[in-house]
Amino acid sequence: THPNRTSRRIRRVDVNAPLTPSHAPAPLRHSVASSRPGLNHYHGASAPPQATVRRAARRAASAPSHYFGASAPPQPPVQRSTPTLASRMSTAISRTRRSSPPKSHILKYTAPLSLSTGVPSDALCTPPVSCNMKEYCIICHDHLDERPCVALNACKHVFHTDCIQLAFKSKPQCPVCRAPIGKPQGHSPSGTMTVSVKPTRCSGFRVDSIFIAYNIPSGVQMNYHEHPGRQHGGKCANAYLPNNVDGQNLLKRLKYSWLQGLSFTVGTSFTTGIADQCTVSN
């Protein structure tokens, strides 16, 4: 049991074991080149060749920072390339492309024999308790407590029963807040609306187009037209929309307008001045 042998046994450390606070090396103050194994010039040996020093420096720069007990070397800033005109155009095109093209279909509208007038029964309710019946009716400007009153379910505004019935003959909405009551009813004659997709491009767009074909045959005017019982002319009209997200959203609104009879009406043509023609509704 030589003392030198015992001290050597004590100083032996497993190199594969994880570093602990007692084994962790302190930050080195010598050069990076001298911190690599094999470069022993700081122990009194002769200095290695410059090529060896450069290789060691490169290896030290790519090695993990915890190996040397120092912070990682600063990385050069990432050079971001400026987007070209072609990349910007491709990005704009991808944003305007449609998610799924609408299928070809036909929407048929049948004009009713007569339009309903007055307030729908399910749109009325009794006035709320908090309503001040000493206030004036906004339609006739009389006190509310002078005649029977009702309130609208949509907005709870209170009116005289006969006043609100008269007001709804001109427009089905609340006279105070303009809230629509019920579904709108237009004066369009019967016809069809055909929707399809065509490769034709609208000006300024690089996608195909949604093609809409309106076909309204001639017929007899209803009692809500200008001259009931008289013949009216037919109409064929076409419309194009870009087949992208905005075009498909506008198509939904045009479909709703068509199914409610709001797209066309019967009257005098602004183009030819001929009466009893099917014209675009305003």
Image: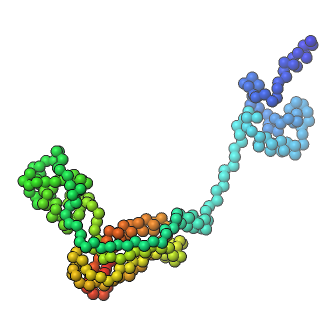
**Residue sitting at the far left:** 146
Q: How is the image coloured?
A: rainbow
Q: Find residue 127 and report its horizontal and vertical position in percent.
A: 17, 50
- Where residue 67 sits in the image (x, y, percent)? 76, 35
Q: Is residue 221 left or right of residue 206?
A: left
Determine whether 95 is above or below 133 in the image.
Answer: below
Q: Quadrant of the N terminus?
A: top right
Quadrant of the image containing the C terminus: bottom left
* x 29%, y 63%: residue: 183
Give the residue displayed 89% in from the left and 38% down from the top: 47
Residue 90 sits in quarter? bottom right
The reply to whether residue 210 is visible in this rendering is no
Who is closer to the viewer here, 54 or 246? 246
Task: Determine the residue positioned at 14% across, 57% down.
Answer: 161
Which residue: 38% across, 66% down? 253
User: Could you tell me residue 125's position as x and y percent?
Assistant: 20, 52
Count up the numbered dots.
Answer: 0
Q: Is residue 128 visible?
A: yes
Front in this rendered view, residue 37 or 88: 88
Q: Quadrant of residue 74?
A: top right
Q: Position of residue 34 (x, y in %)?
A: 83, 36
Q: Nearer the viewer, residue 85 or 160?
A: 160
Is 20 located above or below residue 229 in the figure?
Answer: above
Q: Quadrant of residue 84?
A: bottom right
* Residue 3 shown left or right of residue 75 in the figure: right
